[in-house]
Image (cartoon, rainbow, N blue to C red):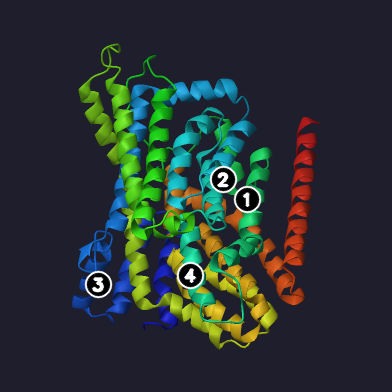
Amino acid sequence: MIGTWVSILPPLIAIVMVLVTKRVLLSLGSGIVAAALLVASFSPAETVSYLWKGMIVSFWDDGSLNTYNIFIMLFILLLGVITAFVSLSGGSRAFAEWAVRRIKTKRGAKLLTVIVGVLIFVDDYFNALAVGQIARPITDEHKVSRAKLAYFIDSTSAPVCVISPISSWGAFLIGQLALILGSTAALSYSPLSAFMLMAPMNFYAIITLLMVFFFAWTNIDFFTMKKHEQLADEGQLFDPDKEIPGQLKEDFPVHPYGKVRDLVLPIIALVVAAFGMMIYTGYQAGGTMNIWSIFENTDVPKSLLIGGSIGTLVAGWSYIAQLKNNETASIQWLGKAFIGGIKAMMPAVLILVFAWALTDLIDVLETGQFLSGVVEKSNIPVGFIPVLMFVLAGVMAFSTGTSWGSFGILLPIAGTIMLNAEPELLLPALSAVLAGAVFGDHCSPISDTTILSSTGAGCNHMDHVSTQLPYALVAASISMAGYIVLGLTGSVWIGLIVSLVILGALFFVWTAKSKRMKTGQSA
Protein backbone atom coordinates (compact mmCIF):
# COMPACT_ATOMS: atom_id res chain seq x y z
CA MET A 1 0.00 0.00 0.00
CA ILE A 2 2.98 2.31 0.56
CA GLY A 3 3.87 4.18 -2.62
CA THR A 4 0.76 3.00 -4.50
CA TRP A 5 -2.49 4.68 -5.57
CA VAL A 6 -3.97 3.69 -2.21
CA SER A 7 -1.66 6.22 -0.54
CA ILE A 8 -3.76 9.11 -1.85
CA LEU A 9 -6.86 7.90 0.05
CA PRO A 10 -6.11 9.42 3.51
CA PRO A 11 -5.65 13.00 2.29
CA LEU A 12 -8.59 12.52 -0.06
CA ILE A 13 -10.78 11.35 2.83
CA ALA A 14 -9.72 14.30 4.99
CA ILE A 15 -10.29 16.85 2.24
CA VAL A 16 -13.67 15.49 1.14
CA MET A 17 -14.88 15.25 4.73
CA VAL A 18 -13.78 18.76 5.61
CA LEU A 19 -15.56 20.15 2.55
CA VAL A 20 -18.73 18.21 3.34
CA THR A 21 -18.90 18.41 7.13
CA LYS A 22 -17.06 21.73 7.68
CA ARG A 23 -15.60 20.12 10.84
CA VAL A 24 -11.85 20.40 10.46
CA LEU A 25 -10.63 18.36 13.45
CA LEU A 26 -13.05 15.50 12.76
CA SER A 27 -12.02 15.40 9.11
CA LEU A 28 -8.29 15.54 9.84
CA GLY A 29 -8.75 12.85 12.48
CA SER A 30 -10.48 10.60 9.94
CA GLY A 31 -7.60 11.06 7.51
CA ILE A 32 -5.09 10.28 10.26
CA VAL A 33 -6.88 7.05 11.22
CA ALA A 34 -7.13 6.01 7.55
CA ALA A 35 -3.41 6.69 7.03
CA ALA A 36 -2.43 4.78 10.17
CA LEU A 37 -4.52 1.78 9.08
CA LEU A 38 -2.86 1.72 5.65
CA VAL A 39 0.67 2.14 7.01
CA ALA A 40 0.05 -0.67 9.51
CA SER A 41 -1.63 -2.90 6.89
CA PHE A 42 -4.73 -2.88 9.14
CA SER A 43 -2.91 -4.46 12.09
CA PRO A 44 -4.74 -3.12 15.21
CA ALA A 45 -1.66 -2.94 17.42
CA GLU A 46 0.51 -1.28 14.76
CA THR A 47 -2.32 1.10 13.84
CA VAL A 48 -2.45 2.35 17.44
CA SER A 49 1.34 2.70 17.40
CA TYR A 50 1.32 4.79 14.21
CA LEU A 51 -1.56 6.90 15.52
CA TRP A 52 0.48 7.67 18.64
CA LYS A 53 3.58 8.48 16.59
CA GLY A 54 1.58 10.75 14.30
CA MET A 55 -0.03 12.67 17.16
CA ILE A 56 3.20 13.26 19.08
CA VAL A 57 5.38 14.09 16.06
CA SER A 58 4.60 17.77 16.64
CA PHE A 59 6.30 17.50 20.05
CA TRP A 60 8.76 14.61 19.81
CA ASP A 61 10.51 13.45 16.63
CA ASP A 62 13.55 11.25 15.98
CA GLY A 63 14.27 10.82 19.67
CA SER A 64 14.30 14.52 20.59
CA LEU A 65 12.01 17.49 21.06
CA ASN A 66 10.55 18.80 17.82
CA THR A 67 11.53 22.38 18.59
CA TYR A 68 10.54 23.59 15.12
CA ASN A 69 6.86 22.76 15.61
CA ILE A 70 6.84 23.51 19.35
CA PHE A 71 8.24 27.00 18.80
CA ILE A 72 5.64 27.70 16.08
CA MET A 73 2.84 26.60 18.41
CA LEU A 74 4.19 28.71 21.28
CA PHE A 75 4.48 31.71 18.96
CA ILE A 76 0.82 31.31 17.96
CA LEU A 77 -0.22 31.16 21.63
CA LEU A 78 1.84 34.26 22.40
CA LEU A 79 0.12 36.13 19.58
CA GLY A 80 -3.18 35.32 21.28
CA VAL A 81 -1.80 36.73 24.53
CA ILE A 82 -0.55 39.88 22.76
CA THR A 83 -3.99 40.34 21.20
CA ALA A 84 -5.63 39.99 24.62
CA PHE A 85 -3.20 42.39 26.32
CA VAL A 86 -3.63 44.97 23.55
CA SER A 87 -7.40 44.66 23.78
CA LEU A 88 -7.28 44.93 27.59
CA SER A 89 -5.13 48.07 27.49
CA GLY A 90 -7.43 49.69 24.93
CA GLY A 91 -4.72 49.72 22.27
CA SER A 92 -6.89 47.97 19.64
CA ARG A 93 -9.71 50.46 20.17
CA ALA A 94 -7.38 53.46 20.09
CA PHE A 95 -5.58 52.22 16.98
CA ALA A 96 -8.87 51.56 15.18
CA GLU A 97 -10.11 55.07 16.01
CA TRP A 98 -6.80 56.58 14.89
CA ALA A 99 -6.79 54.58 11.66
CA VAL A 100 -10.39 55.43 10.82
CA ARG A 101 -9.56 59.15 11.05
CA ARG A 102 -6.74 58.66 8.53
CA ILE A 103 -7.90 55.72 6.45
CA LYS A 104 -11.38 56.91 5.61
CA THR A 105 -12.48 54.34 3.05
CA LYS A 106 -12.97 50.60 2.80
CA ARG A 107 -10.65 50.66 -0.22
CA GLY A 108 -7.92 52.25 1.86
CA ALA A 109 -8.26 49.58 4.55
CA LYS A 110 -8.00 46.81 1.98
CA LEU A 111 -5.04 48.37 0.18
CA LEU A 112 -3.20 48.88 3.48
CA THR A 113 -3.64 45.17 4.26
CA VAL A 114 -2.28 44.12 0.88
CA ILE A 115 0.68 46.51 1.01
CA VAL A 116 1.65 45.37 4.51
CA GLY A 117 1.30 41.77 3.34
CA VAL A 118 3.74 42.42 0.49
CA LEU A 119 6.22 44.29 2.69
CA ILE A 120 6.43 41.56 5.37
CA PHE A 121 8.13 39.03 3.10
CA VAL A 122 10.70 37.35 5.32
CA ASP A 123 8.52 34.34 6.21
CA ASP A 124 5.00 33.17 5.40
CA TYR A 125 4.16 32.14 8.99
CA PHE A 126 5.36 35.50 10.27
CA ASN A 127 3.46 37.29 7.51
CA ALA A 128 0.18 35.44 8.06
CA LEU A 129 0.02 36.20 11.78
CA ALA A 130 1.63 39.65 11.91
CA VAL A 131 -0.45 41.15 9.08
CA GLY A 132 -3.62 40.01 10.82
CA GLN A 133 -2.57 41.74 14.04
CA ILE A 134 -1.86 44.99 12.20
CA ALA A 135 -4.74 45.09 9.73
CA ARG A 136 -7.67 43.49 11.59
CA PRO A 137 -8.64 46.55 13.71
CA ILE A 138 -8.73 48.68 10.55
CA THR A 139 -10.58 46.24 8.31
CA ASP A 140 -13.08 45.55 11.09
CA GLU A 141 -13.86 49.26 11.41
CA HIS A 142 -14.40 49.56 7.65
CA LYS A 143 -16.57 46.43 7.51
CA VAL A 144 -14.24 44.22 5.49
CA SER A 145 -15.26 40.61 6.10
CA ARG A 146 -12.83 38.37 7.95
CA ALA A 147 -12.96 36.00 4.95
CA LYS A 148 -11.72 38.80 2.67
CA LEU A 149 -8.99 39.66 5.16
CA ALA A 150 -7.89 36.01 5.27
CA TYR A 151 -7.77 35.96 1.45
CA PHE A 152 -5.57 39.06 1.39
CA ILE A 153 -3.23 37.59 4.02
CA ASP A 154 -2.92 34.14 2.42
CA SER A 155 -2.57 35.46 -1.13
CA THR A 156 0.24 37.86 -0.30
CA SER A 157 2.32 35.74 2.11
CA ALA A 158 3.42 32.68 0.09
CA PRO A 159 3.36 34.38 -3.37
CA VAL A 160 5.73 37.09 -2.13
CA CYS A 161 7.96 34.69 -0.16
CA VAL A 162 8.34 32.28 -3.10
CA ILE A 163 9.84 34.97 -5.36
CA SER A 164 11.84 36.85 -2.70
CA PRO A 165 15.47 35.70 -2.26
CA ILE A 166 15.65 37.44 1.14
CA SER A 167 13.18 35.14 2.89
CA SER A 168 13.08 31.75 4.56
CA TRP A 169 11.52 30.37 1.36
CA GLY A 170 14.15 31.96 -0.86
CA ALA A 171 16.99 30.54 1.21
CA PHE A 172 15.47 27.04 1.13
CA LEU A 173 14.85 27.15 -2.61
CA ILE A 174 18.29 28.54 -3.44
CA GLY A 175 19.73 25.59 -1.51
CA GLN A 176 17.57 23.20 -3.56
CA LEU A 177 18.71 24.83 -6.79
CA ALA A 178 22.35 24.43 -5.75
CA LEU A 179 21.86 20.66 -5.60
CA ILE A 180 20.15 20.53 -9.01
CA LEU A 181 22.55 22.85 -10.83
CA GLY A 182 25.57 21.22 -9.19
CA SER A 183 24.80 17.98 -11.01
CA THR A 184 25.45 19.44 -14.47
CA ALA A 185 28.18 21.41 -16.18
CA ALA A 186 25.92 22.31 -19.11
CA LEU A 187 24.46 25.37 -17.36
CA SER A 188 26.43 28.27 -15.90
CA TYR A 189 23.76 29.70 -13.57
CA SER A 190 24.59 30.26 -9.94
CA PRO A 191 21.80 29.17 -7.57
CA LEU A 192 21.03 32.80 -6.71
CA SER A 193 20.98 34.00 -10.33
CA ALA A 194 18.80 31.03 -11.29
CA PHE A 195 16.34 31.92 -8.51
CA MET A 196 16.21 35.55 -9.64
CA LEU A 197 15.65 34.51 -13.27
CA MET A 198 12.81 32.21 -12.16
CA ALA A 199 10.81 35.03 -10.52
CA PRO A 200 9.10 36.27 -13.74
CA MET A 201 8.41 32.62 -14.65
CA ASN A 202 6.30 32.08 -11.53
CA PHE A 203 3.06 32.97 -13.27
CA TYR A 204 0.80 31.94 -10.41
CA ALA A 205 2.53 34.20 -7.87
CA ILE A 206 2.43 37.17 -10.25
CA ILE A 207 -1.21 36.64 -11.27
CA THR A 208 -2.30 36.11 -7.65
CA LEU A 209 -0.64 39.32 -6.45
CA LEU A 210 -2.18 41.34 -9.29
CA MET A 211 -5.59 39.86 -8.50
CA VAL A 212 -5.20 40.76 -4.82
CA PHE A 213 -4.51 44.41 -5.68
CA PHE A 214 -7.46 44.43 -8.12
CA PHE A 215 -9.90 43.09 -5.52
CA ALA A 216 -8.51 45.47 -2.90
CA TRP A 217 -9.01 48.45 -5.22
CA THR A 218 -12.49 47.48 -6.38
CA ASN A 219 -15.61 46.30 -4.59
CA ILE A 220 -15.95 43.34 -6.93
CA ASP A 221 -16.41 39.89 -5.41
CA PHE A 222 -17.86 36.61 -6.58
CA PHE A 223 -19.19 33.31 -5.30
CA THR A 224 -19.24 32.87 -1.51
CA MET A 225 -16.91 35.83 -0.93
CA LYS A 226 -19.63 38.13 -2.24
CA LYS A 227 -22.03 36.81 0.39
CA HIS A 228 -19.47 37.38 3.17
CA GLU A 229 -18.87 40.96 2.00
CA GLN A 230 -22.61 41.67 1.85
CA LEU A 231 -22.99 40.43 5.43
CA ALA A 232 -19.99 42.54 6.49
CA ASP A 233 -21.68 45.64 5.05
CA GLU A 234 -24.57 44.85 7.41
CA GLY A 235 -22.17 44.59 10.35
CA GLN A 236 -21.61 40.80 10.47
CA LEU A 237 -17.88 40.38 9.83
CA PHE A 238 -17.94 36.63 10.52
CA ASP A 239 -20.42 33.90 11.39
CA PRO A 240 -20.70 33.96 15.21
CA ASP A 241 -22.02 30.40 15.22
CA LYS A 242 -18.77 29.01 13.80
CA GLU A 243 -15.41 28.40 15.50
CA ILE A 244 -13.19 31.46 15.01
CA PRO A 245 -9.50 30.81 15.80
CA GLY A 246 -7.91 33.72 17.62
CA GLN A 247 -11.26 35.28 18.59
CA LEU A 248 -11.23 36.46 22.20
CA LYS A 249 -14.27 35.26 24.14
CA GLU A 250 -13.72 37.36 27.25
CA ASP A 251 -15.20 40.86 27.58
CA PHE A 252 -12.54 43.17 28.96
CA PRO A 253 -13.32 46.54 30.56
CA VAL A 254 -13.67 49.37 28.07
CA HIS A 255 -11.85 52.52 29.12
CA PRO A 256 -10.45 55.72 27.55
CA TYR A 257 -6.85 55.21 28.67
CA GLY A 258 -5.68 53.21 25.66
CA LYS A 259 -3.22 54.83 23.28
CA VAL A 260 -2.17 53.97 19.74
CA ARG A 261 1.26 53.09 21.08
CA ASP A 262 -0.31 50.32 23.19
CA LEU A 263 -0.85 48.38 19.97
CA VAL A 264 1.96 49.75 17.82
CA LEU A 265 4.82 49.23 20.28
CA PRO A 266 4.17 45.49 20.90
CA ILE A 267 3.89 44.85 17.14
CA ILE A 268 7.07 46.84 16.42
CA ALA A 269 8.86 45.01 19.22
CA LEU A 270 7.71 41.67 17.82
CA VAL A 271 8.76 42.50 14.23
CA VAL A 272 12.12 44.04 15.13
CA ALA A 273 13.03 41.29 17.61
CA ALA A 274 11.97 38.47 15.27
CA PHE A 275 13.78 39.96 12.27
CA GLY A 276 16.86 40.70 14.38
CA MET A 277 16.91 37.12 15.69
CA MET A 278 16.60 35.78 12.14
CA ILE A 279 19.75 37.69 11.22
CA TYR A 280 21.51 36.63 14.43
CA THR A 281 20.65 32.92 14.20
CA GLY A 282 21.52 32.90 10.50
CA TYR A 283 24.88 34.51 11.17
CA GLN A 284 25.55 32.20 14.11
CA ALA A 285 24.85 29.09 12.02
CA GLY A 286 26.53 30.26 8.81
CA GLY A 287 29.48 32.11 10.28
CA THR A 288 29.27 34.95 7.73
CA MET A 289 27.38 38.22 7.34
CA ASN A 290 26.49 37.32 3.75
CA ILE A 291 22.73 38.04 3.48
CA TRP A 292 22.04 34.89 1.42
CA SER A 293 23.91 32.71 3.90
CA ILE A 294 22.05 34.32 6.80
CA PHE A 295 18.59 33.53 5.41
CA GLU A 296 19.68 30.07 4.34
CA ASN A 297 20.74 29.21 7.89
CA THR A 298 18.34 31.25 9.98
CA ASP A 299 16.20 29.57 12.64
CA VAL A 300 12.74 30.98 11.86
CA PRO A 301 10.70 29.29 14.66
CA LYS A 302 13.21 30.26 17.36
CA SER A 303 13.30 33.82 16.03
CA LEU A 304 9.50 34.04 16.00
CA LEU A 305 9.28 32.69 19.54
CA ILE A 306 11.75 35.24 20.89
CA GLY A 307 10.03 38.02 18.95
CA GLY A 308 6.65 36.89 20.29
CA SER A 309 7.99 36.77 23.85
CA ILE A 310 9.36 40.30 23.65
CA GLY A 311 6.15 41.55 22.04
CA THR A 312 4.16 39.93 24.87
CA LEU A 313 6.31 41.59 27.52
CA VAL A 314 5.91 45.00 25.88
CA ALA A 315 2.12 44.51 25.57
CA GLY A 316 1.90 43.44 29.21
CA TRP A 317 3.98 46.37 30.37
CA SER A 318 1.74 48.78 28.41
CA TYR A 319 -1.18 47.62 30.55
CA ILE A 320 0.78 47.57 33.83
CA ALA A 321 1.80 51.19 33.19
CA GLN A 322 -1.89 52.13 33.35
CA LEU A 323 -2.42 50.77 36.88
CA LYS A 324 -1.78 54.10 38.57
CA ASN A 325 -4.17 56.06 36.31
CA ASN A 326 -6.83 53.55 35.30
CA GLU A 327 -9.28 52.69 38.07
CA THR A 328 -10.52 49.60 36.18
CA ALA A 329 -7.02 48.17 35.69
CA SER A 330 -5.76 45.35 37.92
CA ILE A 331 -3.22 42.55 37.89
CA GLN A 332 -6.11 40.08 38.05
CA TRP A 333 -7.30 41.27 34.64
CA LEU A 334 -3.80 40.71 33.29
CA GLY A 335 -3.99 37.06 34.34
CA LYS A 336 -7.46 36.69 32.80
CA ALA A 337 -6.21 38.22 29.55
CA PHE A 338 -3.23 35.83 29.47
CA ILE A 339 -5.50 32.80 29.88
CA GLY A 340 -8.04 34.25 27.43
CA GLY A 341 -5.35 34.73 24.77
CA ILE A 342 -4.15 31.15 25.16
CA LYS A 343 -7.70 29.81 24.94
CA ALA A 344 -8.41 31.87 21.83
CA MET A 345 -5.50 30.33 19.95
CA MET A 346 -5.95 26.72 21.11
CA PRO A 347 -8.28 25.76 18.22
CA ALA A 348 -5.64 26.86 15.70
CA VAL A 349 -2.92 24.94 17.55
CA LEU A 350 -5.05 21.78 17.63
CA ILE A 351 -5.75 22.03 13.90
CA LEU A 352 -2.01 22.41 13.27
CA VAL A 353 -1.19 19.36 15.41
CA PHE A 354 -3.71 17.27 13.49
CA ALA A 355 -2.51 18.60 10.12
CA TRP A 356 1.13 17.85 10.98
CA ALA A 357 0.15 14.34 12.11
CA LEU A 358 -1.61 13.67 8.81
CA THR A 359 1.33 15.10 6.85
CA ASP A 360 3.76 12.84 8.72
CA LEU A 361 1.71 9.69 8.00
CA ILE A 362 1.25 10.72 4.36
CA ASP A 363 5.02 11.00 4.14
CA VAL A 364 5.36 7.43 5.44
CA LEU A 365 2.82 6.32 2.82
CA GLU A 366 4.99 8.00 0.13
CA THR A 367 1.99 9.73 -1.42
CA GLY A 368 4.22 12.41 -2.95
CA GLN A 369 6.59 9.85 -4.46
CA PHE A 370 3.66 7.99 -6.02
CA LEU A 371 2.32 11.16 -7.65
CA SER A 372 5.75 12.15 -8.94
CA GLY A 373 6.29 8.65 -10.32
CA VAL A 374 3.19 9.08 -12.45
CA VAL A 375 4.94 11.91 -14.29
CA GLU A 376 8.22 10.09 -14.74
CA LYS A 377 6.45 7.14 -16.35
CA SER A 378 4.29 9.20 -18.68
CA ASN A 379 5.56 9.82 -22.20
CA ILE A 380 4.43 13.35 -22.99
CA PRO A 381 5.94 16.01 -25.29
CA VAL A 382 8.69 18.06 -23.66
CA GLY A 383 6.81 21.32 -24.29
CA PHE A 384 4.03 20.23 -21.96
CA ILE A 385 6.36 19.38 -19.07
CA PRO A 386 6.09 22.85 -17.43
CA VAL A 387 2.28 22.83 -17.31
CA LEU A 388 2.29 19.20 -16.19
CA MET A 389 4.69 20.06 -13.37
CA PHE A 390 2.41 22.93 -12.35
CA VAL A 391 -0.62 20.63 -12.17
CA LEU A 392 1.24 17.83 -10.38
CA ALA A 393 2.76 20.21 -7.81
CA GLY A 394 -0.71 21.64 -7.22
CA VAL A 395 -2.24 18.20 -6.71
CA MET A 396 0.62 17.14 -4.44
CA ALA A 397 0.50 20.27 -2.25
CA PHE A 398 -3.29 20.07 -2.08
CA SER A 399 -3.14 16.40 -1.05
CA THR A 400 -0.29 16.67 1.44
CA GLY A 401 -0.92 20.19 2.77
CA THR A 402 2.70 21.23 2.29
CA SER A 403 4.26 23.27 -0.48
CA TRP A 404 7.79 22.72 0.88
CA GLY A 405 7.30 18.96 0.80
CA SER A 406 6.24 19.26 -2.83
CA PHE A 407 9.33 21.36 -3.56
CA GLY A 408 11.62 18.75 -2.02
CA ILE A 409 10.13 15.90 -4.05
CA LEU A 410 9.37 17.51 -7.40
CA LEU A 411 12.23 19.97 -7.96
CA PRO A 412 14.88 17.22 -8.35
CA ILE A 413 12.54 15.22 -10.60
CA ALA A 414 11.76 18.22 -12.81
CA GLY A 415 15.47 19.03 -12.92
CA THR A 416 16.45 15.52 -14.00
CA ILE A 417 13.75 15.35 -16.69
CA MET A 418 14.57 18.74 -18.23
CA LEU A 419 18.34 18.38 -18.07
CA ASN A 420 18.04 15.18 -20.08
CA ALA A 421 15.29 16.33 -22.44
CA GLU A 422 15.41 20.12 -22.87
CA PRO A 423 17.91 22.08 -20.71
CA GLU A 424 16.55 25.38 -22.07
CA LEU A 425 13.27 24.70 -20.28
CA LEU A 426 14.89 23.75 -16.96
CA LEU A 427 14.17 27.01 -15.13
CA PRO A 428 10.59 27.32 -16.46
CA ALA A 429 9.86 23.75 -15.34
CA LEU A 430 11.30 24.43 -11.89
CA SER A 431 9.31 27.67 -11.66
CA ALA A 432 6.15 25.76 -12.59
CA VAL A 433 6.80 23.45 -9.62
CA LEU A 434 7.05 26.43 -7.27
CA ALA A 435 3.93 28.02 -8.72
CA GLY A 436 1.89 24.82 -8.60
CA ALA A 437 2.90 24.06 -5.02
CA VAL A 438 1.77 27.50 -3.83
CA PHE A 439 -1.51 27.05 -5.72
CA GLY A 440 -2.17 23.66 -4.12
CA ASP A 441 -1.26 25.07 -0.72
CA HIS A 442 -3.79 27.88 -1.18
CA CYS A 443 -6.57 25.39 -1.93
CA SER A 444 -5.80 22.78 0.72
CA PRO A 445 -7.80 22.80 3.96
CA ILE A 446 -5.02 20.77 5.61
CA SER A 447 -2.27 23.29 4.78
CA ASP A 448 -0.55 24.87 7.77
CA THR A 449 -0.20 28.24 6.04
CA THR A 450 -3.91 28.24 5.18
CA ILE A 451 -4.68 27.45 8.82
CA LEU A 452 -2.43 30.28 10.02
CA SER A 453 -4.01 32.75 7.57
CA SER A 454 -7.43 31.90 9.02
CA THR A 455 -5.99 32.39 12.50
CA GLY A 456 -4.35 35.72 11.66
CA ALA A 457 -7.58 37.05 10.19
CA GLY A 458 -9.82 35.67 12.94
CA CYS A 459 -11.84 33.82 10.28
CA ASN A 460 -13.47 30.41 10.41
CA HIS A 461 -11.03 28.06 8.67
CA MET A 462 -13.48 26.50 6.22
CA ASP A 463 -14.96 29.90 5.38
CA HIS A 464 -11.47 30.98 4.35
CA VAL A 465 -10.85 27.84 2.28
CA SER A 466 -14.19 28.03 0.46
CA THR A 467 -13.94 31.76 -0.29
CA GLN A 468 -10.31 31.70 -1.47
CA LEU A 469 -10.72 28.60 -3.68
CA PRO A 470 -12.44 30.32 -6.66
CA TYR A 471 -9.79 33.06 -6.77
CA ALA A 472 -6.98 30.49 -6.63
CA LEU A 473 -8.60 28.45 -9.42
CA VAL A 474 -8.86 31.51 -11.65
CA ALA A 475 -5.18 32.36 -11.09
CA ALA A 476 -4.21 28.73 -11.70
CA SER A 477 -6.20 28.50 -14.95
CA ILE A 478 -4.49 31.62 -16.31
CA SER A 479 -1.09 30.28 -15.20
CA MET A 480 -1.71 26.97 -16.97
CA ALA A 481 -2.43 28.83 -20.22
CA GLY A 482 0.81 30.74 -19.76
CA TYR A 483 2.85 27.59 -19.17
CA ILE A 484 1.35 25.90 -22.24
CA VAL A 485 2.34 28.89 -24.37
CA LEU A 486 5.78 28.96 -22.74
CA GLY A 487 6.35 25.28 -23.46
CA LEU A 488 5.21 25.54 -27.08
CA THR A 489 7.11 28.74 -27.91
CA GLY A 490 10.12 28.36 -25.62
CA SER A 491 9.68 32.01 -24.61
CA VAL A 492 9.06 32.98 -21.01
CA TRP A 493 8.01 36.49 -21.95
CA ILE A 494 5.41 35.38 -24.48
CA GLY A 495 3.95 33.04 -21.86
CA LEU A 496 3.89 35.84 -19.27
CA ILE A 497 2.35 38.34 -21.70
CA VAL A 498 -0.39 35.88 -22.67
CA SER A 499 -1.15 35.34 -18.97
CA LEU A 500 -1.31 39.08 -18.32
CA VAL A 501 -3.52 39.68 -21.37
CA ILE A 502 -5.99 37.02 -20.16
CA LEU A 503 -5.97 38.54 -16.67
CA GLY A 504 -6.47 42.04 -18.10
CA ALA A 505 -9.43 40.80 -20.15
CA LEU A 506 -10.97 39.28 -17.01
CA PHE A 507 -10.46 42.54 -15.11
CA PHE A 508 -12.27 44.37 -17.93
CA VAL A 509 -15.16 41.89 -17.98
CA TRP A 510 -15.54 41.90 -14.17
CA THR A 511 -15.46 45.71 -14.06
CA ALA A 512 -17.98 46.07 -16.90
CA LYS A 513 -20.31 43.53 -15.29
CA SER A 514 -20.08 45.34 -11.94
CA LYS A 515 -20.96 48.67 -13.59
CA ARG A 516 -23.96 47.12 -15.36
CA MET A 517 -25.21 45.67 -12.08
CA LYS A 518 -24.86 49.04 -10.31
CA THR A 519 -26.64 50.81 -13.18
CA GLY A 520 -29.47 48.28 -13.03
CA GLN A 521 -29.82 48.68 -9.27
CA SER A 522 -29.86 52.50 -9.46
CA ALA A 523 -32.44 52.36 -12.23
The residue identified by callout 2 is: 118
Q: Position of residue 189 (x, y in %)?
A: 60, 71
In this rendering, is residue 139 above or below 124? above
The residue identified by callout 3 is: 50
Q: Give the structural element (helix, strand or loop) at label 2.
A: helix
**Crowd band around label 2 with a 10 angstrom C-alpha radius: few (<14), some (14–19), many (20+):** many
Say which label, 3 or 4, has the lower sequence index.
3
Q: CA distance from mark 3 to mark 2?
A: 40 Å
**Amino acid residing under circle 1:** Leu
The answer, for residue 470, to whether it is visible in the render is: yes
Do the numbered discs 2 and 1 sit on residues whose CB atoms are within 8 Å? yes
The answer, for residue 345, to whether it is visible in the render is: no
Q: Give the structural element (helix, strand or loop) at label 1.
A: helix
Say which label, 1 or 3, has the lower sequence index.
3
Q: Position of residue 398 (x, y in %)?
A: 49, 65
**Amino acid residing under circle 2:** Val
Q: CA distance from mark 4 to mark 1?
A: 24 Å
In the rendered image, the quadrant that contains the N terminus is bottom left
Say which label, 2 or 1, has the lower sequence index.
2
User: Residue visible at 58% across and 40% down?
Assistant: 115
Do the numbered discs 3 and 2 sit on residues whose CB atoms are within 8 Å? no
Q: Residue furthest front?
A: 288
Q: Give the structural element (helix, strand or loop) at label 4.
A: helix
- Mark nearest the camera among 2 and 1 is 2
- Mark nearest the camera among 4 and 2 is 4
The residue identified by callout 4 is: 176
